Image: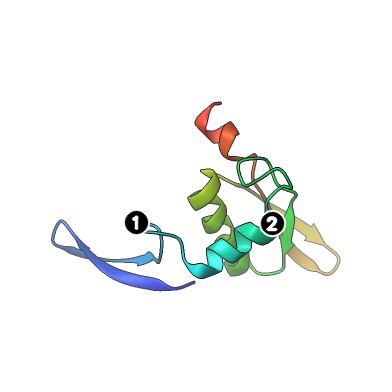
Amino acid sequence: MQTTTRTIDGIQVVIPVGSLDRPSDECRKIMEASQDHRGWKYPIQPASFGSKDAADDYAYCLDFYMGGHETREVWTTFGTRYVVTSKGYYHYVGA
């Protein structure tokens, strides 16, 4: 994930690109590929990752567009998997 450095109240902070301005191109592509056929405001199917970093990057994109996500850690005979999903924008805004 791309990061940038910002000064907030005189303190240097490293933040993911898009978290205060706009989403990164990578996040836009992730949302286009994972959104429900009705659009990005609806729940999505779970995505499974073998890396916590990859799951966190994906979750960040869901947070930016949909307002939230859920992550489960699943243990398998092949190692730990991280399953990430989102209930959709409408759920998180209370619509």
Residue 56 on image: x %, y %: 56, 61
Disc 1, SS: loop
Displayed quadrant of residue 78: bottom right
Q: Quadrant of residue 4?
A: bottom left
User: Residue 21: x percent and y percent?
Assistant: 35, 58
| Colouring convention used in this rendered image of the protein | rainbow
Q: Residue at x 67, y 51 (%)?
A: 35
Q: Of label 1 and label 2, which has the lower sequence position?
A: 1
The image's mark for residue 34 is 2
Q: Residues within 10 Å of mark 1 (few under 14, many from 20)?
A: few
Residue sitting at 54 percent across and 69 percent down? 26
Residue type at mark 2 is Ser
Question: Percent x, y for residue 65?
Answer: 52, 50
Taking the spot 59% from the left edge, 46% from the top edge, the residue there is 69
Asked if residue 83 is positioned above or below residue 38 in the image, the reply reads: below
Residue that lies at the very extreme toward the right in this rendered image: 77
The disc label shown at residue 48, or none? none
Q: Secondary structure at mark 2?
A: helix
How far is mark 1 from mark 2, CA to CA? 23 Å
Amino acid at dot 1:
Leu
Mark 1 sits on what residue? 20
Pointer 1 and pointer 2: residues touching (CB < 8 Å)?
no
Q: Position of residue 30 (x, y in %)?
A: 62, 63
Please give the name of the residue rendered at 39% of the width and 71% of the height, measured from the top-left corner. Answer: 3
The foreground one among 75 and 83 is: 83
